[in-house]
Amino acid sequence: MFARLVGESFVRNPRRILLAAAALAVGMAVTTATLSVALDVGDRLAQEFRSLGANLLVTAESDTLPLQIGGVDYRPVDEGAYLNQADLGKLKTIFWRHNIVGFTPFLDVPERVLAGSDWTAVSVIGTWYEHDVSVPDGSSFRTGAKLTHPWWKIQGRWFREGERECVLGEGLAARLSAGNGPIIGKKIQLENTENLDATTAALTPSIPLVVTGIVSTGDAEDNAVLVSLPLAQELARQPGKFRSLFVRALTKPEDAFSERDPSSMTPVEYDRWYCTPYISSIAQQIEQVLPGSDARAIRRVAQTEGRVLSRVGGLLWLVTIAALAAAGLAVAATSAATVIERRSEIALMKALGATNVMVGGIFLAEQFVLAFTGGAIGFVLGTLLARVLGESVFGTPANLRMVLLPIVMGLATAVVLLGSVIPLRRAARFEPAPILRGE
């Protein structure tokens, strides 16, 4: 009898039931889509933020301040401190080693280049574009500027390690090729500025390098000569050394907890901080495996990531709450209209001995059927919508996450229950006699 009463209520009011189910399905579809995107947005935005380049700068703890004039670092190559290239493989042994996307060492050497008949001071920058690093566990990791500086644009090709080749910054290339035609494929002459004085200038040997490409970086490298790191180490007479390291790491957006001083934390708080991929905790782990290093966040990149991720996450939650509220209002409106239309039926059931619990049970059973139907349809539609959103925003469709199905069904049930609270309270206050008399 109970199932028959519930079934007949759907048959007698199909239009209103369909309207409520449609509203609930739309609300659950939007909820499913936003939750699916929210679960993927961190990883997807992290991939997009790779185009911003490195977010950590590592230097020697006791290094001197750079002295740059016109884009040329005039620090003597024997001044300050250096880091060991042999230690770089240890970066892939830290707790958050899988979050280290790439790293690139740099070594600046002050030189001068022959431009026409005159010598011009330049900075020779030794680095890697693509390089395999040996990891202590026996594996290898390919890294370099291709990963940490993805916005660099090359015309021609990059230098090869072990060869006397170089890449010129576009600004320097324009000066050297003025009136001489294309410079790619030609040789340039370098001299070390530290070996020059009035008596030995003529005896200082110059180093010929073949220009293999022209790079555009939008930074100081546009007026520099880029060479392989081993060649720069040879010029600086610092074998196996480098001066600075750019690291690209996947991190969690900074919050108030991440900005606390680790030395002031309790052991439990420190473990939580250390085991969370904050940029500050990854920086400390890098300092632990690179002796004498100082790792600092490049705030421009780190703050941009945190700001965008927090805003996108807030927007997604706002849309989800709005969709749930709209679905709840639609369900509440249809429930209230149903209770008013069925006043006589409710009064008759009460007159025949039905309790408020029994009457409420009939209406709740109808709402549960509505929640199951609307939630299931909404989950399917929301999954399709999430794929469309992922394709249009990130270029790849969002992943199907079946873990969201019970969550969506639970939210649908909660929405219909909350939407039915006021109509059911009103039905419980109905008095059979006045209603049956038509009053």
Image (cartoon, rainbow, N blue to C red):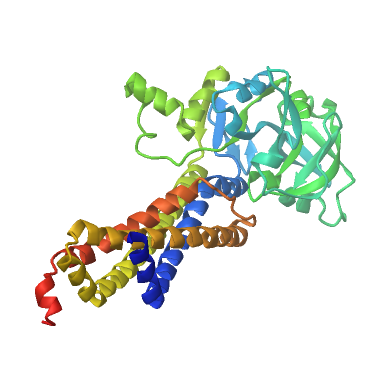
Name the residue rendered at 58%, 57% in the picture.
390
Q: Is 56 located above or below residue 341 in the figure?
A: above
Q: Quadrant of the C terminus?
A: bottom left
**x, y percent for residue 130:** 76, 36
Which residue is nearer to you in this view: 304 or 428?
428
Q: Quadrant of residue 17?
A: bottom left
**x, y percent for residue 424:** 22, 63
Q: Quadrant of residue 10?
A: bottom left
**x, y percent for residue 326:** 35, 67
**x, y percent for residue 96:** 55, 28
Residue most extreme to the bottom:
438
Name the residue rendered at 84%, 43% in the picture.
211
Which residue is nearer to you in this view: 439 or 325?
439
In this orientation, does residue 253 appear? yes
Q: Quadrant of the N terminus?
A: bottom left
Which residue is nearer to you in this view: 101 or 55?
101
Q: Is 176 located above or below residue 77 in the figure?
A: below
Name the residue rendered at 65%, 19% in the picture.
87
Name the residue rendered at 84%, 31% in the picture.
206
Q: Is 421 located above or below residue 344 in the figure?
A: above
Q: Is residue 119 left or right of residue 406?
A: right
Q: Is residue 186 left or right of residue 277?
A: right
Q: Is residue 116 left or right of residue 125?
A: right
In this orientation, does residue 321 appear? no
